[in-house]
Amino acid sequence: MSTTTSSTRFTPCLICDTPNSRDSLLCCECSAPLALTHEAADPERRPQIVSVLGDSNVGKTVYLGFLLDMLSQRANDFEAIPRGAYSVDLQQNVISHMAYRMFPPKTPMESHQWNWTYYQVCKRTRNPKWVDLVMPDMAGEALAAELAAPSTFRIIQKLLARSAGLMLLVDGALASSGSAQPDFFAVKMMSYVDSLFAGRRKKKITMPVAIVLTKGDYCPDSFDNPRRFAEANVNRLWNLCQSRFANVEFFACSVVGSLAYATAEGEDFVTPVPLHTALRGILEPFEWMLEQL
Amino acid sequence: MALKLFSRASTAIDSVSLLKQGEFLPAEKTRLADDPLERALQLGRYGMIVQQRDRWAEHPGFEKILDAAVKAIDERFALVPEGFVSVALSIFDQPGGPEQDIETGPFLLARHAVTNADFQQFVDGGGYDELDLWPEEIWPHLIGFKDQTGHSAPRFWQHGRHHRKLANHPVVGICYYEAAAFAAWAGFRLPTEAEWQMAASWRIRSAAHVNRRYPWGDVLDLARCNIWASGFGGTLPVDACPGGAAPNGVQQLIGNVWEWTSSDFEATDRDGRRIVGDSLLKSVRGGAYDTYFPWQAVSNFRTGLGCLARVHNVGFRCALDVPTE
């Protein structure tokens, strides 16, 4: 991994290796916060990137926010230490909104406004193995734009190329209602990842990929057997994974215990309201990912 | 320093851990008595026996069976005195927000949530087939009230049987109508939302005007309830966490499973817009083992759930009017 150059006048970005002046806040090329690089400067640290991907409104921000908050609360004997105050922003944003029964605002499309998280994580065992993890919260619209026109968001390309693992969130509720949109987006995303490793096409890609079916409160069947659910409801994705990815696992999760809507007479829109939380399946994909790294 | 947030508050084993221990163990079938009154007692339809005493008056063993039913009600229900509650009208229930004061009369409330073993009696007694127990408008949905193997039973059962190791856990995977049908079949009813809140907040009419945040007091104690931070990750037996009981001995009003009430969930957001669901929302109360925010598992927190939802973390308990004789 990149560290500060010996001259100390320039800092290569952790994500794209572009040299930046030492006092810059964001990378001049990809807009990643250079605090990531500074935090990772310790030669004993080898930060690994786990990219959380998915369509707009699939629940990436909420998933990541609750995951980090649960880790911070030592759920399932995990321990997580944020490296830098900026790493806490995402979970604070999610928790403070959900506590007031509101979804957090959409992640801005501009990469310099994304939330970046850098945590040291370990499972509290006799011989705990600490892992440095960088997990950015990317905007679904930005991902869609990059899929439609590669290199629109070069940071996405750089991030994925550097990722040690992927968590692809798929809207299980929408898929089970018969919509093909979640399947198509997921196939595009995985095809894009596949193309990044085009030189190794003969072999399947071994990078661990956790496919997480979200909004399980609306499709409880997804919890019974996520693999079977995926095969039935996002079959194109299932087939692509079978063909090109050697290390894929399927999971289901939900955060909302009951979803309602606020509406008024005469209004032609409704506002979704998470009436209460009921976390399910949040840690399992992460735990699996950690075992694979 | 470890906060011990996840230290086990009880030696009870949660449902998820039990299910990981091996294959599904179906509860054994019970041979039911041929005599209808004896069968009613055997199935735990105590309220029905007491309510329909005129119907059974000629039965040779009636007095004995009536005594047994009354005794069972005495053991299983506790008196909630008359009182009053303030029900928040907005989901952004900040101090000073709009509230409605509701008087509640005295009533009896079950000390425990209905267990899988209790609900098994309803299934074995043919409750799903008694159309009188179900509102006519939901008859088309009855065919969907199936377990994992297509039998009429709670969602997570198999072949119409509950998992033997979960006999004393609250029944879950039942919608509002299944809860209401069980209660009616047994001769009871579901509590209203205000009654439930009264039982949990214990706001009895007294000089002190106590209004508890929890049945045991005002401070969260993870040893007294099963919410996410308690760290169990599944349901516990209905008699676990006895320290969380209300002053009258009613247990687990907070945590373990949300509880269906008979009330519709009606509320507004902070802008006064009405809260609606995909289907009719019924009020559920108390929080569950997976309730992440502790302030969503307190006596006055209001939320709702679609009346046909059959989820893993919602059960119910029965109520009964105080007998007039």
Image (cartoon, coloured by chain):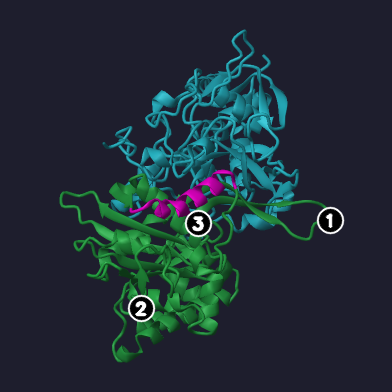
Q: Toward the viewer: A26 or A215?
A: A26
Q: Chain of mark 1?
A: A
Which color was chain B given?
cyan
Secondary element at tag 2: helix
Tag nearer the camera, 2 or 3: 2
Label 2 close to label 3 by CB (< 8 Å): no
Give the labeled residue for mark 2: A161
Q: Which residues are magenta?
A: A83-101
Can residue B56 be seen here? The reply is no
Quadrant of the image for the C terminus of chain B? Answer: top right
Could you tell which of marks 2 and 1 lies nearer the N-terminus?
2
Q: Which chain is green?
A: A
Q: Which residue sits at x=53%, y=19%?
A: B67
Label 1 close to label 3 by CB (< 8 Å): no
Task: State which quadrant residue A30 falls in.
Answer: bottom left
Could you tell which of marks 2 and 3 lies nearer the N-terminus?
3
Side of A163 relative to B258 (left or right):
left
* Residue B170 percent location from the top left of the image: 46, 39
The tag on residue A62 is: 3
